[in-house]
Image (cartoon, rainbow, N blue to C red):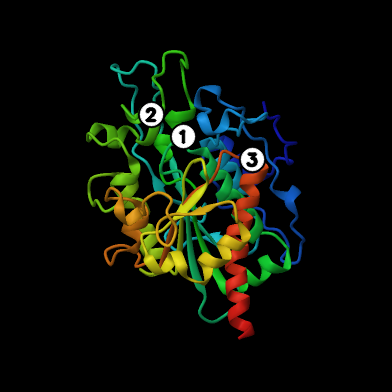
Amino acid sequence: MSQPMQARPITRAFICGVLASGFVCASMLALAADEAVDESYFDYPYEEVYDYYIIEAWRGLDEPVPAYTPEMVARHTELVAELPWVSPSPSATEGLVLGYTPGWPQDADWPNDPEIPAQPIYGYQITDPDTDGPKVKMVLASGSHATEFTGNWVLEGLVNFVAGSEPEAVFLRENVIFYVYPDVNPEGRYQAVHRIDLEAAPDPNAGTNMRKRGNPELYAAGEQDHNRVWPTTGQFTTIDTITAAMEQDTGGHADYLWDMHGPQEPANWRSPSDEARVNAYAEALLEREPDVLRCGPPGDFKVNVASGPPGKLSLWAKSEEGLQVSYPYVYEPGGWTRERLLESGRNLALALYDVLTAETDE
């Protein structure tokens, strides 16, 4: 089992953000603009491995990937929020909160499910605030499927890199705005990792109730999959909050989107856009991650997002009713170690660096 990382000293922001109120407070301690940010800056105590949720793709690992809990979303958000190039997205409060989920009382029909308090929905942006002119817009989202923790580790690796001090990260912040939505299904994630009786819980991979991919709000409406209802309006509080925020934050258009999901063998990425599978960024991805397969033509692995069930985040994001994203992507990383997942997030950002620097050299 993985051992917790050495805890970073607890700051005033962490105390008021996580322990007291459950979200990041406005009185965050900002770092000096010229302070170096290395990998150790992002260290925080993560949770134990929840064996019941170690799906097949992880079982061959000597150290299975830890769960990614709501507390970890809050801790990581608090850490990056202290950096001078991280700010609330336009629709968020100073505490980087877009809004709250409705919360749910304990259900007598499911005695092993916990009560779910209202959960904060986070949103923030990473960019150099002193750089003027048009910038590329990349949306980053994870957590739609409640137990697909690997997507959050990939997103964390990407965020840690673009928020760091390496020259490539500095260049990206000067030329890109990263809009980050680290958990787009907070109630699903809460009930997935706050388990009262693990032995009594049904198989989380069975998809027969809200445990795997939904949340109580979806389950009450007869929906099982959080990634099938993104075009809806007025039906689900969390979906409405996040889609409205994404539209406001990006101004209704983004260039790239990554929707992070869970482990698959082999690891793969896909897009509902034909051009997105063969553009310069796609080629850069194949160079940076040669072991990760591209789905659909010109390859022959799996179907594309556009060929699957409707209602997915990437399909909504691509549509005129959504964000009109030019290049939307869905990522299914492999059953990797935590370190490999963090590295993969870094590579997704470096592929964008490759594209942008190639354009400036032309």
* Disc with the residue nearer the chain's start (3 vs 2): 2
Instruction: Return the residue at label 3.
Output: 338
Whether 247 is drawn above or below 144: the answer is below
- Provide residue 59's location: percent of width, then percent of height: 57, 28
Residue type marked 3: Arg
Residue 35 seen anywhere in this rendered image of the structure: yes
Whether residue 120 sits left or right of residue 36 in the image: it is left
Instruction: Return the residue at label 2.
Output: 211
Whether 179 is drawn above or below 55: the answer is below
In front: label 3 or label 2: 3
Can you say which quadrant of the picture contains the C terminus? Answer: bottom right
Residue type marked 1: Thr
> Which of these two is toward me, 15 or 225?
225
Label 2: few (<14), some (14–19) or many (≥20) C-alpha neighbours in 10 Å: many
Quick one: which residue is furthest to the bottom in this view? 362
Task: Assess whether mark 2 and mark 1 are in contact (beta carbons under 8 angstroms).
Answer: yes
Whether residue 344 sits left or right of residue 186 in the image: it is right
Instruction: Return the residue at label 1.
Output: 147
- Provide residue 297's location: percent of width, then percent of height: 40, 60
> Which of these two is toward me, 318 or 71?
318
Residue 162 in which image quadrant: bottom right
Whether residue 176 sits left or right of residue 3 in the image: it is left
> Which of these two is toward me, 42 or 300?
300
Label 1: few (<14), some (14–19) or many (≥20) C-alpha neighbours in 10 Å: many
> Quick one: SS at disc 1?
loop
Please tell me which residue is depicted at 51% across the width and 65% down the height of the picture: 282
